[in-house]
Amino acid sequence: MSTTPEPQLYAAREPIFPRRVQGRFRNLKWVLMAVMLGIYYITPWIRWDRGPNLPDQAVLVDLANRRFFFFFVEIWPHEFYFVAGLLIMAGLGLFLFTSALGRVWCGYACPQTVWTDLFITVERWIEGDRNARVRLWRAPWGVHKARVYLTKWTVWLLIALATGGAWVFYFADAPTLLRDLLTFQAPPVAWITIAILTATTFFFGGFFREQICIYACPWPRIQAAMMDEDTLTIAYRDWRGEPRGKLRQGKLDPGQGDCIDCMACVNVCPMGIDIRDGQQLACITCGLCIDACDEVMDRIDKPRGLIGYLALSDETHEKAGKPAISAWRHVFRPRTVLYTVLWGGVGIGLIVLLLMRTDLDMSVAQVRNPLNVIMADGSVRNAYEVRIRNMHGEAREFTLALDAAVPMDIVLEGVPDLTVTVPADTMLNQRVYLIAPPDSPAASAQRTDVILRATEGISGQAIATQTLFNGRGN
Amino acid sequence: MAGDDKKQDPTASEGVPDQANRVAPPERQYPEPKAELKRKVAAEPPTTGHVWDGIREYDNPMPRWWLWTFYICIAWAVIYWILYPAWPMVSQATPGLLGSSTRGDVAREIADFETRNEPWFERLNATPVAALREEDDLERFAVQAGAAVFAAQCSQCHGAGAQGVQAGGFPSLLDDQWLWGGTLEEIHHTIRHGVRNEDDPEARWSEMPAFGADGILDGDEIEQVVEYVLAMSGQSHDEDLAAMGAEVFEWNCAACHMDDGSGNTDLGAPALNNQIWQYGGDRDTIRHTIYYSRYGVMPAFAQRLREAEIRAVAVFVHQLGGGQ
């Protein structure tokens, strides 16, 4: 042991300086980046009129009052199954997109990818393209390097601050919170949230970058298990490219493959990998190597697509010289159709539920300690805690009534008649007594089924709940 | 692989430990990695020297992030020892520079809630007792606060659901019969001063004679009046004895329980002509009550609770279903 030198097992991170690239996928990514950042920053500022008693912010997570507002939808805590349904849809959507297009989420839509892309773009604006950045990186520290790096970090920090700053607007009225932030009157939780998200954005986008994808994220592990031979991923057509070699006097040798080993695909890769090694865990399928390679193929008059979206099943096909199966046939296959049907089914179910739900809800909880009370005249009384949820922008009056096959009285605690007023968008707690006259069927029986009904005064909208009446049981 | 093992070594599946028959699993043959892949592999790491069924354990160093987390935790622990109570000494732990104490935290939290409740308590004290349920927000506070006080101070006798305990003579607070009156003011007075205690001159006080034990009525008269009380509440009884009992009742009982047995809340005399019994309404229990009398007591809560808390409990009891 002592004679052999200790092998160095720590592989320090090699910094990656992706080169600028132009092409179809790069353009698509620019558009997607603009759309997604736009959605993220603009959404909290969209207004939506819900009447005088409710917030006018289109998308608002009101943690203090336990409400979630999404345009015309208002979700109460007891309707959390909508969120569960959305999570199921997100899961099925992951299955669908991964089985059809591989890690398309990672490459185009993941916030880590989008913000890293933005940070790299800023880096390129300030420091120049790949070669300039590598040079600056290797240069000894000096005034120039410090100035450029500080400028870069400042811009990054501002972007990070805007990112963390935008997040908190989803949880409070955006204009009010912005005013409070500018006048330093915002609640501490807002500042802490902004600070944490600013820090994570700054470090994740500026420094950790691909390491988050490779070491921290479970997605690559999960997704690798969900791909099959029909999944479209990015691949290098080695049967076309190999044996690779440099151009000799601007020409390819006859025995040479199409790959001229120009390293363009490696230099543009934000993950710092060589796609020619094959599909691998670190590849987020962002498509930039396709753009880079296509550009080179154009220049050396070779057909595009040495690197391209390819399914595993196409490999043997293409190696045998047959044309590739069309991408549509890879995407539409029983597995993806099944996922789409399930995904759509859950989605339609949620929409139907959303349209069917009323803005009125009632729950009845019987007081069981004691089960009943014998009154002076021998009648038997049961008590119920009734909760009426008025999920409406205005206060409404409800009249409570009783449906029972046997004689029984209904009385409300602290209310002279049977009508209660429930303020806008609140839940009312009202104790209700049912009284069975002495020696009546319900007073003597062990249990009697009864139905409590609440009817809205103006619209006549009603809701009923079945419950039990506990008699003396003799 | 597991299946292969079983085929090669039938004894293993039967659980017979026979080292001699153990067949070593075949060495797995991995294809030589391609040259371009190989260049990324740093070196073959050393092993610990342990071998299990041909599997060797690499002696890899800890991941660096893990190691650093470990060091930071150690540093954190040292700082924690200095700032917070940490090392147990003879009488107490080292106090720490920040003077943190969980008991102090609890005391602070209680004080904080007290301060926040103070305006409500002041409102409770400032509002006339009879009007305590007229303002919605004040009533809501009183019911919540009263429920907490009830659970701590009253439920031991009156039950968690306030249904009372007949075996102990603790009255139910849910029904519509009251010994000393069921208005907010009467309930408030009863809670404040209690029943039959020497501590409070204003305590509710009445005392039924022990008609049998003190020799006021003889055995026959007691039997007669028992039947009469049964008759008043509509239970099965002996007609003849009850008729004789009417006279005994009129002379001995009606002064407090009234002629018709409807009771008198001024005197704390319960109604006898209804279906509610504090101690039980069967023949034996009624006889026992008349013979030995009853002497239920309740503490004066003015000496235990603040006025605002008493008012809150009064509101809570009043809204249980029997308030008048």
Image: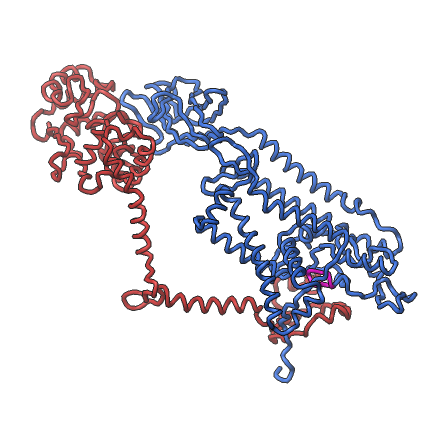
Q: Which of B267 and A123 is in front in this view?
A: A123
Q: Is B295 on the left or on the right of A346, as rendered?
A: left
The quadrant where residue B33 appears: bottom right
> Residue A38 or A114: which is nearer the viewer?
A38
Query: So how many labels did they put on this image?
Result: 0
Q: What residue appears at the point 80 percent right and 65 percent down from the top-left corner?
A: A262
Main structural element of the magenta stretch: helix, strand or loop?
Answer: loop
Q: Looking at the image, which residue is at 47% across and 20% down?
A: A458
Q: Is residue A398 magenta?
A: no
- Residue A83 vs A385, above or below: the answer is below
Which residue is nearer to you in this view: A151 or A157? A151
Q: Where is residue A457 in the image (x, y as percent from the top left)?
A: 45, 20
Residue B136 visible: yes
Q: The blue chain is which one?
A: A
Asked if one can make out residue A449 in the rendered structure from this viewpoint, the answer is no
Residue A226 is situated, as x and y percent measured from the top left of the image, at 69, 51
Q: Taking A133 as reference, is A81 above or below it?
A: above
When asked about the image quadrant of residue A64, the answer is top left
Name the image quarter holding the N terminus of chain A.
bottom right
Letter of the chain in red: B
* Left or right, B149 with reference to A115: left
